[in-house]
Image (cartoon, rainbow, N blue to C red):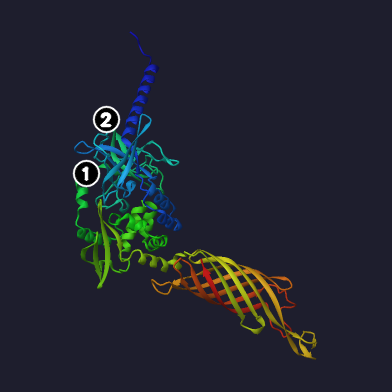
Amino acid sequence: MFKIKTSQRLFTSFAALCVGVVSYAAELRESVCYIKESKNTSLNCDNVANALQNKSFFSAARKVRDYAGGESHGSGFVIKDDKGKLIVVTNKHVVDDAKYVDLTFEVNGAEVKYARCPVVFVSKNVDIALVNFPSNEVNVPALKFNKDKIKDGSDVWTAGYPALGDKPSWQLGKGVMSNNSVKDEFFGNVDSVAVYQHTAQVDPGSSGGPLLVKDKSGDFVVIGINTWKASYRENTNFSIPIRYYNSVATNDEIAASTTENKSNDVEETAKQFLEEVKKKDADLSSYVANEMLFDMDESAVSALIDNASETRKIELRTKAPVPVMKSIVGEFVFNKVKKIEEVEYSATVKDGDNYKSTYLYKGKEIEVNWKESSDGYKIVSSSSSPEEIERAGESKVIYSQEWSKYFEVGFSKGLSEIYGKKFDASFMVVPVKYFLYGYRLEMGHIVKHKFDQLPETNYYGEVIGGDTTYMKEEEPFLGLAIRLGGQCPFNLAPRGKVFITPYVIGDVGWVISGSADFEAALHTGVRLGYTTKKSNAVFVGAECNFKRMMSSGFESSGDDDGCDFEKRRYFTLSIGYGF
């Protein structure tokens, strides 16, 4: 009888195991895809992206630029619904509010793409979205799923297509379940939503991919949807349990519910919109049309960001920016309202091809215009858009420092005759609201009193006799100084363009008058200005400045009648232009 050596058996078992793992991985790739929004080049995203970038939301700006071209991506996976129909599960933030997405699978080393697949369901409460294939004749292997809670310490796997450079790249990661029931307001209602925390790899682009375990036969089984990665912790990733998919029974019911939503009465939508606005920081993106956001000027978008709550600003850094910006647009509909709970719905009437809803606040009407689209009624304009938004943006300029530089010229008169007059020109940079720095050039003269003839003096230099007749002599000087200071701008009205800015500026430099001498000065004053439509400003100013000469370049520290030139005081009037 032929006997296999122990070493041969071990090698054979190891080879079989490798083949099995490769087989599972190959099958898994055929069921997991990467998702990109179908290209929509009709959208002009530049204004929104530029405004976000200028406000230092760099990642959000990049995602908005990708939005029109469909360059950003996430992951998804295939399961069968209760009627055996194939459906792709992913995250809501992966599809944003796209109507169609492209699905790409890897089969035997080659890419298989399904273009313009409709997004048929987006959950309002959980970060889940569902996508249909373009036809019923698609043959893609579906993954099994397990809705039971998985024990802590269990081995888990993540699968998806995080980016390698700019290209989606397959990744299968392994870790353990570290907490099978994490509740936090960030993930949703703490009373009803608990997510999985695990250590398997999740990277940008992995969102929407499956969290997996192996069943007794060694097959991968879906237990969750990979959604979040904690940037402040090591190996701390979160997935939505697949049991939340229970909220949708079948693919047909999804399509039916979507169609039903499209035919919702516009009056009901208008009422629902008000109720959602009354919930602080609620997701309003589904009520706002794309064109309402993307047709705005950059200054109007900047105003929206300035007026947004801190929660919204955090969301711009942590969530898909387009829905967040649309929610900010929705909130601005009621920007004139101080107490949103006092707003009441009035009526909706047909207005040409669109509908006009009226809301009442303390006897004043607020109008909102709705347009019917393929997925329901959307807000296309309101009494706060776009002119009101732009005016708000202009009124916020002095606070957000849209103009970051200014040029100023001033005329100064000495508080004593001997200090003479001088002319100043300053160029200043304002990198943030309260801080400024720059340079100052000054030209002027002082008035010196000279004895016509030297009088008699005693040992101490005191005049004791002789001719004490004075003559006046003007001595010019030129100075250059570096400036550093602070300011505190205020608008004179909540929505006004007029501002007042107290400031304190110190400078150090050199004064040339026969020789070069060191000087230091302190300037305290106030500017009164007007912010123009192009986010520039003109202003006038008044200040007192105090100058100290550390060593005088004049013939002495004073003139012949004992006046001191090392300490000088001036009053200055100035005009300036911010840009």
Whole-percent x, y for residue 190 in the image: 27, 52
Residue 576, can we see it?
yes
Which mark is on residue 216?
Answer: 2
Residue 241, position as x, y percentages in the image: 27, 43
The tag on residue 246 is: 1
Identify the residue at image location x=39%, y=53%: 44
262 or 417, nearer to the observer: 262
Q: Which secondary structure, mark 2? A: loop
Judge by depth and name the residue closer to the eye, 321 or 3: 321
* Quadrant of the image occupied by residue 388: bottom left
Can you say whether 471 is above or below 402 in the image? below
- Residue 389: name its quadrant: bottom left
Residues under numbered marks 2 and 1 in contact, where contact means CB atoms less than 8 Å apart: no
Report the mark closest to the observer, 2 or 1: 1
The Cα atoms of the two marked residues, 2 and 1, are separated by: 24 Å
**Outermost top residue:** 1
Q: Looking at the picture, which amino acid does disc 2 mark? A: Lys
Residue 426 position within the rendered picture, expressed as x and y whole percent measured from the top left: 58, 69
The percent coordinates of residue 75 (x first, y second) are 34, 41
